[in-house]
Structure formats: structure tokens, C-alpha cells
Amino acid sequence: MKPRLLEIRKAVLKKNDEIAAKLRERFLKHGILALNIVSSPGAGKTLLLKKTMEILIQEGFKVGALVGDLQTDNDAKFLAKSGAPVRQIETDGNCHLEANIVSDYLADWDLTDFDFFFIENVGNLVCPANYDLGESLRVVLLSTPEGEDKPLKYPPMFNSADIAVISKIDLADFVEFDRKAVYKNLQAVHPMLAICELSAKTGLGMTNWLDFLKSKLRVLRSEMSIKV
Amino acid sequence: MKPRLLEIRKAVLKKNDEIAAKLRERFLKHGILALNIVSSPGAGKTLLLKKTMEILIQEGFKVGALVGDLQTDNDAKFLAKSGAPVRQIETDGNCHLEANIVSDYLADWDLTDFDFFFIENVGNLVCPANYDLGESLRVVLLSTPEGEDKPLKYPPMFNSADIAVISKIDLADFVEFDRKAVYKNLQAVHPMLAICELSAKTGLGMTNWLDFLKSKLRVLRSEMSIKV
């Protein structure tokens, strides 16, 4: 990369981190578990989010979401059916979300009482890796039809995530998905990565996923109470 | 985007276009049909390429390939099994190929006698759209598990392509793929886009795809002979 371009990119990332730190502070002040959901296009982020939000709402949690796409507000409309407040960010061609746009969209949003806040990133397994959005938890989806080799080919994303969700597990046999290989590849790029297999379509594995989210919320709030 | 950053990006794109124009000239001078293959991660670019090259080689064509990934040379090793010369470009984190890196990797490569030259881009449905690699044909893959809505959500890529390959068509029923919807969505973003459905795994649709490639090569060479 050209030195001048590299220098500007570094400045952009530094500015992003500063805004993300303020966002994180805001989420934590309200005891909110904020999640940044990343994956390839079509890995099933939106369906997982809708099912997750529906169940959490039924269980009495308060949830909200921001969803990023190059164009269309289809995902926000679909997610709003869960009953949760959802806003669409159209990035107008930008390949990832940045902290400043998340901050803008959250500026007039009253976050009091929220338990979980989901940020669905643009479908892209490369560029979103570099941009902190102030989340407490970064979730990367890897759908079984994509293949077991993706962690090795896209290491920054899998390395920066806190949990890998192996999605569309109902298709595993049909696409001859090699579970052993994917665990090995995930551990090669991120030895401590949490892994969760599920199908948002059939419901398989959803309980484990929701238990994981709720345990993370409990940990976040107990840490808060220690700090207070 | 910041004005300064935008200005530099424009300069990068302009420089890229200049190098791509030289690459295109070089491919055309040798009567080579150069293809830039783009898609989301895991849409099946590499398997399609391997099967395509194997059949073309059997039929007496001379083919070669460059393959881009953030990391690993797994794809080049896999593709080389076809018997074709293949080189791997590791982008070291960069989210797309650019003309200068393609040019560097081709610098010492004797292109005389090649018929088809395939450039497999980094798996990314956003960023590669902006970078001309000197190809005569841009091929975008959309695999059935990704869903019918992708053309609407990633319009620059589908708009800049010459043909959309709907891959993994053997999974269509299993993932409840809506063919009518995908044709409608593809035509909405690119009314004249050629469309080809196939499964590299089962072989379904491969003949159509290969006929398409060979007809494009014939057109390219007859245009050349007119110019001479």
C-alpha cells in the first residue's frame, strides 16, 4: 500500500477507535450487551437475529438493532417483525460499518432499559474486521455451505471475533461439511474462540446460543456492579 | 467519506484503470479471454474453476489462472491439480485484487498460446467491484444458499458483471431458493445481465457455461481478426 494512503487509513482507524470507545462507554453505562454480527453475505445473520430477538422479547428482555447494508431497508423491515425497534443503515456502497455512523444512528435513541443491542454489519468477511463499533461481543457467522477452510483464508475476522457461530447446521450433511476440520481451522487462527453450532431455521442449537448471550449479559452486569 | 480520503481513493482507482488498460491490451494481443471471477466467500469459485479448467484442457484449450486470497495457497494447489499453470496471490489482508498486483504476477509469464486466463478474486461481494483487472469478462457467482436478495443488497458487483452464475443449483430445493425472485432481482440491477445456473459438484449446467465461454472466445478472436 502507498505510504500516504496507509498513513490516512491509520488515522481513520484511530479516529474510529476513539468514537468506538465512547460508544462502548455508553452501552456499558446502561448495562447493555452490544453485539457486532459479521459474516459473508448470505450466511444467515438476519434470520438468526430475528429468531434471537423474538425469543429474547418473549423472555422479557428489551432488545434493539441496527442493520447495515449497501442498499435496501429490507432487513430492517424483516427484523422489525420481531417487535423490536430496528433502524437500517444504508452505507451507500461502503463495505463495512464504522463507529461514527453507528454513533450518528444512535444519537437520539434512548438506550435506557435495553438489555441487548445487536449491530448487524455489512455482509463482508474482510473489511469489517478492522472497525471496532463499541461492541462487547463480536460474533462471526460461518455457514456450512461456505466450507471449512474460511477461517484460514480470512484470519483477521475470525481472530477478532469472540464467538464463531456455525450457521445452517441443518445443511451440514447435505454439503458434506467437515466439522472436525472447521474446529481445527478455527482453533488454528484463534485458539480460545467460543464456538456454537446452530440452525436458525430449524431451531437446533438455539438454546445454547441464547444461554451464551444471557450468561455474557450476567457477567457484564456483575462486573458493572463491582465497579460501582 | 472525508474529502481528502475520497480524493486519494479516486487517484488510486484512476491509476488502477491505467494499469488494467495495459493488461487488457496484453491479453487481447494474444487473443486470450481473460475472466475476473468474483463472489462472496464460499460461493464455489474455486471448484467451478477447477472443473472448468479440467474440461477445457481435455478439449485442447490452453488455460491458466491467478488466484487471490488474504492468506494460504490452498486454492492454487487445488487448482493446479487440473494440470493448468496456477499462481497464488496472497494479498496479506487486502480485501480485493488490483491491476498492479495482477500485472506483477503476470510480468514474467509467457502468455503466448493461452486461450483462457482466469483470475479468481478475493471472496468479497463489495470491494472487488471497483477494480478493473483488465478482464474481458467479469463473472459473479451467487450460490443458492446465499439467498435471492443479494443482487439488491450488493448492486455494484452485479451491475459491473457480464454474467451471473447461480452456483450450487443442486442445493436449490433444499434451501428453498426462489428462482423467479433471483431473476427479477438480477434484472432490476442489471437488465442485460447473462445468467447461467449450474452445479460444479454434479455437473448440471456445466455445458451451457462452457459453451458460453467458448462463444465469447470466438467473438473476441473474430473481433481481433477484423481489427487486424
Image (cartoon, coloured by chain):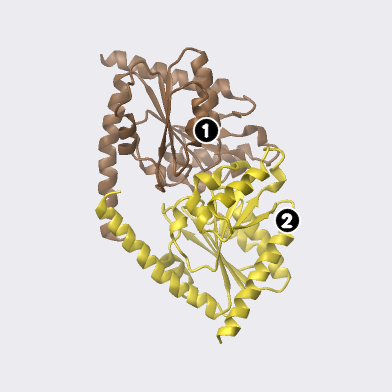
Chain colours: A yellow, B brown
Residue B110 image point, x, y percent:
32, 21
Residue at the disc numbered 2: A205
Q: Nearer the viewer, residue B144 or B121?
A: B121
Residue A14 image point, x, y percent:
36, 66
Q: Is residue A72 visible?
A: no
Q: Quadrant of residue A117?
A: bottom right
In the figure, B154 relative to A73: above or below? Answer: above
Residue A102 image point, x, y percent:
46, 66
Residue at the disc numbered 1: B46
Residue A124 image point, x, y percent:
49, 50
Gap between marks 1 and 2 measured at Cα: 30 Å
- Left/right of residue A183 with respect to residue A39 in the rendered view: right
Q: Chain of mark 2?
A: A
In the figure, A137 relative to A147: above or below? Answer: below
Q: Amino acid at mark 1?
A: Thr
**Residue located 42% across and 54% down the image:** A92
- Left/right of residue A98 with respect to residue A135 in the rendered view: left
Q: Quadrant of residue A222?
A: bottom right
Kind of element beneath mark 1: helix
